[in-house]
Image (cartoon, grey):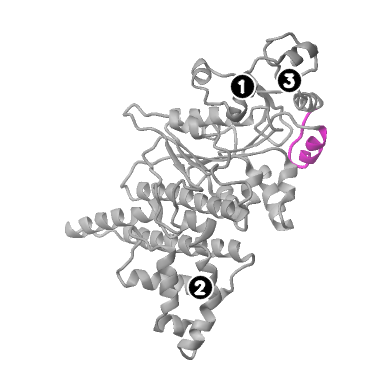
Amino acid sequence: MSWFKAGIIGNPSAFVLSLPGLGKSTLIRKQFIGAVAQGHVPIVAGDIKGEYVAVTDAMVTPAGKRGQVIRLGHGHGHLNPLAAGALGEAIPVMRAHLEELHARGEDNTRLAEAITETEESVHSRQVTMVMALAELIRGRTLADFEGLVISASLRSMRESGQFSFSSPPLLRDLIDFIRSGNDGLRRALFVADETEYRRTVQTLVQTLESLTDGVMGQVFAEHTTTKIDLDAPAICIDVSAISRGDQSLKAGVLLACWSDAYGAMEAAHVLADCGLANQRYFLAILDEMWATLGAGAGMVQRVDELTRLNRTDGTGLLMITHTGRDLETLPNEVDVKTAMGFIERAGMVICGGLPAGELDRLKGVLQFSDAEAAMITAWSKGAPIERTQLRQEKKRPLGQGMFMLKPSKDGTHGIPIHVQLTHTERATNIHDTNTRLREFLDAAPSSQQAAIA
């Protein structure tokens, strides 16, 4: 955001590429801390490996407000896909303000229009989220009339007065409503009688039922346990509790996380536009991008939306993956082309250690001088193999913490940087991602290892 403000880059985003173990997550966490220092709110919507939990928890405002960590997964909380989140909660605030204006005899057509737009946006998010989850379970897209049933049912449920944007239904409520049906649904589906209606919606109901039980039900069947707090200095949605084998659950949770986080950012902007809150700026962090994009249908489009709108949405964006090859493994050619466009549209590209083949792959997007290419490929090598002494300090890869920052794609020289940790960062250990291996790494060498040394 600072470089964008200074006019150095065209949009406030960066794409980070580096082989594992060379410190790219540490670099991002330092930018995370810098964003908080500037009063911006970093949001990690779907922390797959729990690498941003410690730094989020360490962020504390002068008033004592801590960073918010939301945990989702097996036994760690629920996320209602029909919850309107912060965007839905903005609607009654806007309505109350409009009523105050009317009571004073003032008319605010723009505010009334903003309320209608926000309601339609929330409704669209609800429909899209339910359809996306249903498609993950079914393994193929829903029929057009099934989307109609979901949309019409949600509208009817709100019109009945039982539910609202600030008091949303659960998936179970939606299923029961579709089961029962009404004249409006039967008319929309153009069915002759109740029997034909039930036959028409049977498959949809069966699909939605599967979202309320099993691994999906553990997350999506109940009301949201912890809502996003826009007053927090930093936000991390930790999904590391989801096992690697639950691909459908992981895809669904990531989709829901992005929808919830994006809605929260939009809510802040809507309230600011209406003069009901101060303007806020955000830093959306998408680490392990390869896993997020490949998690399920809709993820590439969701990220694509953010990369195209982050300037108008007041949002900085950091996208991180290992190599460009990660993006080429997506299931279809359209998604691959869209994902490769993320690098092209990024305001800056930051390269850690990469093999020579990866630089060849990036030539269509970036121009490297011979000296730059030599540095980047040298950083991709591991620690030198040398005879070591017992208890000698552990050797580190040559390229750990070394990065080439390219603020332009026109051949302008890059800026080599070396990431260094402050005393506070070392003392708090917020960058340690080897906690599982800590005992092994800290242990003194065995007699056999000493003899080899």
> Looking at the figure, which quarter contains the C terminus?
top right
Q: Secondary structure at mark 2?
A: helix
Q: CA distance from mark 1 to mark 3?
A: 13 Å
Q: Residue at x 59, y 63 (%)?
A: 137
Give percent across and percent down for residue 184: 41, 81
Question: Could you tell me the amino acid type at mark 1?
Answer: Val
Q: Classify residue 106 by image quadrant.
A: bottom left
Answer with left or right where residue 243 lies relative to residue 58.
Answer: right
Q: Which residue is mark 2?
A: 205
Give the number of marks: 3
Label 1 vs label 3, nearer the camera: 3
Nearer the observer, disc 2 or disc 3? 2
Q: Earlier in the sequence, mark 2 or mark 3?
A: 2
Residue 128: image location, x then y, percent: 51, 62
Which residue ends up furthest to the front in the rendered image? 447
Which label is found at residue 291?
none
Region in magenta: 356-369
Q: Tell me the mark number nearer the camera, choosing from 2 and 1.
A: 2
Dot 2 or dot 1: first in sequence order is: 2
Whether label 2 touches label 1, CB < 8 Å: no
Which residue is at 76% across, 15% downward? 448
Amino acid carrying mark 3 in the image: Leu
Amino acid carrying mark 2 in the image: Val
Residue 248 visible in rendering: yes
Residues 357 and 102: in front is 357
| 367 magenta-colored | yes
What residue sits 44% from the left and 64% below the top?
Answer: 171
Q: Where is 398 relative to 68, above or below?
A: above
> Per the image, is 52 magenta?
no
Residue position marked by numbered label 1 in the rendering: 419
Residue 398, numbered circle: 3
